[in-house]
């Protein structure tokens, strides 16, 4: 099993608000292991078996080696719709709702 990312060792997970996604594909360029565009032209996260999770707002763990790429995706996302949060308490640590 892949080690998951964390701030201070805490596990993180990521989800996309597809209602705000512009479909530009920046996230899939930064972190293709985590994000992919579906045939509807919107980005979705991928599961731990590399499968595309096609449910809106689906959540997937952030693997530690990919944390930088996922954070860059959240920062550059034109739709401000990539949310990275702590698994333990659901607090967003990167993304539009992070403090
Ligand atoms: S970077 Fe943001 S707006 Fe662009 S495809 Fe990814 S989730 Fe959608």
Image (cartoon, rainbow, N blue to C red):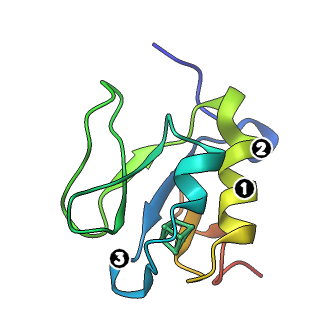
Tell me: is circle 3 under 8 Å from ligand 1: yes
Considering depth in this image, is 66 or 38 the residue closer to the camera?
A: 38
Residues at marks 3 and 2 touching, judged by CB atoms closer than 8 Å: no
Residue named by callout 2: 68
Q: Quadrant of residue 92?
A: bottom right
Tag 3 secondary structure:
helix
Residue 74 percent coordinates (x, y): 66, 65
Return the mark for residue 99: none
Looking at the image, how many numbered discs can be counted on the residues? 3
Residues at marks 1 and 2 touching, judged by CB atoms closer than 8 Å: yes
Considering depth in this image, is 24 or 80 the residue closer to the camera?
A: 24
Residue 87 percent coordinates (x, y): 51, 51
Q: Determine the residue positioned at 63% across, 72% down.
A: 77
Q: Quadrant of residue 16?
A: bottom left
Residue named by callout 1: 71
Return the mark for residue 18: 3
Does residue 82 sit above or below 22 in this rendering? above
Tag 1 secondary structure:
helix
Rounded to the nearest angstrom, the CA distance separating label 3 from label 1 is 18 Å
Does residue 18 sit above or below 14 in this rendering? below
Q: Determine the residue positioned at 43% across, 72% down.
A: 23
């Amino acid at each position: 099993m892949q080690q998951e990312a964390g701030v201070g060792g805490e596990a993180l997970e990521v989800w996309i608000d597809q209602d705000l996604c512009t479909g530009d594909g920046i996230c899939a360029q930064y972190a293709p292991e985590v994000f992919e565009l579906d045939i509807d032209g919107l980005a979705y996260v991928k599961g731990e078996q590399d499968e595309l999770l096609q449910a809106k707002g689906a959540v997937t763990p952030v693997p530690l080696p990919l944390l930088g790429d996922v954070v860059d995706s959240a920062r550059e996302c034109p739709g401000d719709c990539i949310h990275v949060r702590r698994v333990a308490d659901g607090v967003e640590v990167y993304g539009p709702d992070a403090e």
